[in-house]
């Protein structure tokens, strides 16, 4: 079986084909600065405020040459993002000009610098709204005047999900009972961003707080809360909480009450998997937050994760909840595997909460079994997702037999469909896996198996132009070797479904391959084809003095096999060549021995054997 390490390497190569992108980090701002002002003395000096004002001034009057100097001065001063954000708020008209510069692109250098400055301002906005000191201060203001409450709510809305842990802490604080009604009243005003931390906090043991969270989710009114609420309806010990949860679902969508929680979680997982816009993390950071409930400390914990796979991690978590709601809901397993492969396809390090002992996607996939792998593969084929498809196929290679390989998902057979996938690694892997399983039932697409095996053995460079830059030599060699071994297994088993003779032309061309292991395997495959051209190609390889001794010895062994299976189909010239090799005293002894064995297997007329015997007679 194909080694896990090699599979992972292939998956990562396919990633570069499929993804083809990298998410720039904000810390790279200075590395991206245009080199308009290479000398320090050419860059204006001054305070951040002076440079900001002068930058906007010269931008306004169209002196872009000077504006760029002040923009670089801002960037090279390593400005405090919050301070720069505050300056942009003080001059909102100037900030609008900055945005228009980016949109209208009057000067390429100025646009590049302006984008970097805007990026830092966005960092400042995030740092300000997520600052615990500001959040706690605003929560304290909720207990004051009506006007103070209104202003505090607006600022907590800006803090979004970051406000929720502190609000829940305040709600759980016995010393703040008098403030509780106003804090509770503010909770739903935080809006959609509050749903993820509130949903995680539903695991609290405090029934009173849990009730307020349930009510707030209903008031916020977004469908992503429904699965968590229905889970309470189905599982919570408190009849009061079950009633509150049902009421909240009715506020969002009464029809959801008729849908099992597992199905609602699965629906939510699919929405995350397909990056539904309404589930997006906040735009002002290059990461997303996954929220967990600390049952020991009875508090929320936040795990910052790479934005590149945020949706996929949330899809996995929703699938996990679906299985908690109904352990028999197998579709969640297939989606969980696809989401994990999809997260892994980013090439980014997996999140810290996975821990060092967390296995990679392939381990879970091979453990899951064929049914769920076919679900993941069917989704990948439908979505044209090469990385997920390849992961599912390679896992099937280690776990599935003939019957389970050709599993149906609905009316489709995912592995059969993968034979015509638009990514060659997926096509090749599918062909190899099916060939090695040795199907006995005929199906119309069997011709694609041989076609892909032949192409993997001797790649069609014209067909491979789309990914030639990433299809490296190691990957080419890996697939060629796998393909040759799969074809050999097919002919040795005399498989009635996969006709390797359709690849005879390609196989014969491969006798001149530069890779000895491929030459040897090709000779072994050709030995099983009942064809004069196949047998003669083996003989040519065996006689070829340019081939290594190992290749020639293996070729004569294959020739002997061919002769035993199909009798002699060689030309007189080739027979004479073998005879000359055997009769020469300069021939390597081992080569002479295998050549003689092949010669004998050809069962040649007695005249040939007589000549060989008499040639060695001493008078």
Image: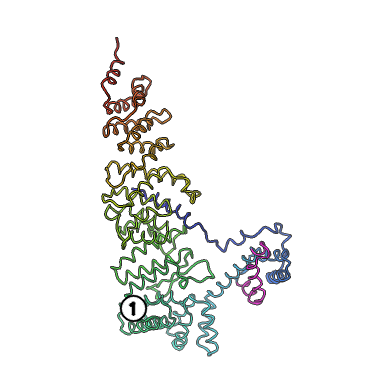
The quarter of the rendered structure image containing the C terminus is: top left
| Residue toward you, 49 or 408 | 408
* Neighbour tally class for label 1: few under 14, some 14-19, many 20 plus, Cα within 10 Å: many
Image position of 220 (left or right of 31) = left
Is 92 part of what is drawn in magenta? Answer: yes
Q: Is residue 57 magenta?
A: no
In this figure, which colouring scheme has been used for the structure? Answer: rainbow
Residue 15's place in the image compared with 282, above or below, is above
Front residue of this view, candidates 232 and 261: 261
- Give the residues in magenta: 82-111
Give the residue at the far top of this rendering. 619
Which quadrant of the figure has residue 263?
bottom left
Residue that mark 1 sits on: 232
Q: Position of residue 331 (x, y in %)?
A: 32, 66
Total labels: the figure holds: 1
Q: Residue 37: percent from the left, percent from the top? A: 70, 59
Give the dominant element type of the magenta stretch: helix, strand or loop. Answer: helix
Residue 62 picture location, percent across and down = 73, 68
Left/right of residue 247 with respect to residue 472 in the rendered view: left
> Residue at the spot x=31%, y=16% of the render?
615
Left or right relative to 468: residue 406: left
* Res 241 quadrant in image: bottom left
When asked about the image quadrant of residue 532, the answer is top left
Residue 334 position, x and y percent, is 34, 63
Q: Is disc 1 placed on a helix, strand or loop?
A: helix
Check the image and report above or below for 357 versus 455.
Answer: below
């Amino acid at each position: 079986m194909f080694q896990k390490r090699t599979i992972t390497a292939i998956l990562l190569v396919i990633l570069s084909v499929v993804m083809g992108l990298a998410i720039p980090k904000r810390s790279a701002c200075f590395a991206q600065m245009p080199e308009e002002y290479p000398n320090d003395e050419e860059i204006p000096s001054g305070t951040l405020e002076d440079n900001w004002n002068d930058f906007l001034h010269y931008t306004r009057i169209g002196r872009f040459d000077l504006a760029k100097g002040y923009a670089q001065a801002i960037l090279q001063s390593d400005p405090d993002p919050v301070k720069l954000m505050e300056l942009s708020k003080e001059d909102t008209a100037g900030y609008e000009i900055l945005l228009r510069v980016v949109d209208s692109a009057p000067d390429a250098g100025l646009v590049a610098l302006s984008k970097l400055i805007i990026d830092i301002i966005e960092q400042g906005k995030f740092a300000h709204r997520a600052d615990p000191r500001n959040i706690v201060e605003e929560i304290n203001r909720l207990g004051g005047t009506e006007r103070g409450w209104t202003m505090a709510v607006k600022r907590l809305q800006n803090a979004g999900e970051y406000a929720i842990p502190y609000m829940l802490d305040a709600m759980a604080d016995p010393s703040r009972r008098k403030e509780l009604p106003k804090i509770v009243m503010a909770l739903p005003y935080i809006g959609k961003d509050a749903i993820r931390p509130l949903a995680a906090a539903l695991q609290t043991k405090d029934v009173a707080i849990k009730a307020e969270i349930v009510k707030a989710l209903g008031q916020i009114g977004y469908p992503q809360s429904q699965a968590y609420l229905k889970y309470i309806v189905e599982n919570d010990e408190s009849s009061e909480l079950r009633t509150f949860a049902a009421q909240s679902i009715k506020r969002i969508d009464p029809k959801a009450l008729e849908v099992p929680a597992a199905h609602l979680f699965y629906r939510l997982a699919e929405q995350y998997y397909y990056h539904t816009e309404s589930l997006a993390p906040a735009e002002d950071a290059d990461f997303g937050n996954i929220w967990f409930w600390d049952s020991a400390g009875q508090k929320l914990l936040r795990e910052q994760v790479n934005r590149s796979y945020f949706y996929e991690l949330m899809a996995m978590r929703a699938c996990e909840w679906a299985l908690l709601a109904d352990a028999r809901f197998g579709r969640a397993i297939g989606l969980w595997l696809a989401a994990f492969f999809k997260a892994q396809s980013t090439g980014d390090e997996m999140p810290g909460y996975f821990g060092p002992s967390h296995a990679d996607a392939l381990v879970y996939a091979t453990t899951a079994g064929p049914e769920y792998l076919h679900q993941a593969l069917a989704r990948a084929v439908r979505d044209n997702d090469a990385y997920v498809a390849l992961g599912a196929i390679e896992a099937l290679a280690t776990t599935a037999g003939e019957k389970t390989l050709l599993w149906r998902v609905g009316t489709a057979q995912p592995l059969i469909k993968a034979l015509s996938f638009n990514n060659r690694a997926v096509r090749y892997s599918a062909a190899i896996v099916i060939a090695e399983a040795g199907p006995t039932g005929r199906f119309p697409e069997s011709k694609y198996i041989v076609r892909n095996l032949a192409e993997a053995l001797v790649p069609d460079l014209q067909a491979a132009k789309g990914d030639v830059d990433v299809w490296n030599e190691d990957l080419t060699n890996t697939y060629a070797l796998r393909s040759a071994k799969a074809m050999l297994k097919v002919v040795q088993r005399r498989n009635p479904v996969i006709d390797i003779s359709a690849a005879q032309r390609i196989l014969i061309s491969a006798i001149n391959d530069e890779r000895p292991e491929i030459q040897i395997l090709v000779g072994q495959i050709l030995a099983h084809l009942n064809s004069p051209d196949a047998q003669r190609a083996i003989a040519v390889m065996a006689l070829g003095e340019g081939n290594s001794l190992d290749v020639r010895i293996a070729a004569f062994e294959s020739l002997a096999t061919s002769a035993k299976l199909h009798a002699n189909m060689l030309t007189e010239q080739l027979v004479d060549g073998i005879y000359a090799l055997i009769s020469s005293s300069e021939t390597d002894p081992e080569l002479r021995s295998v050549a003689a064995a092949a010669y004998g297997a050809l069962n040649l007329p007695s005249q040939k054997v007589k000549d060989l015997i008499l040639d060695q007679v001493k008078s």
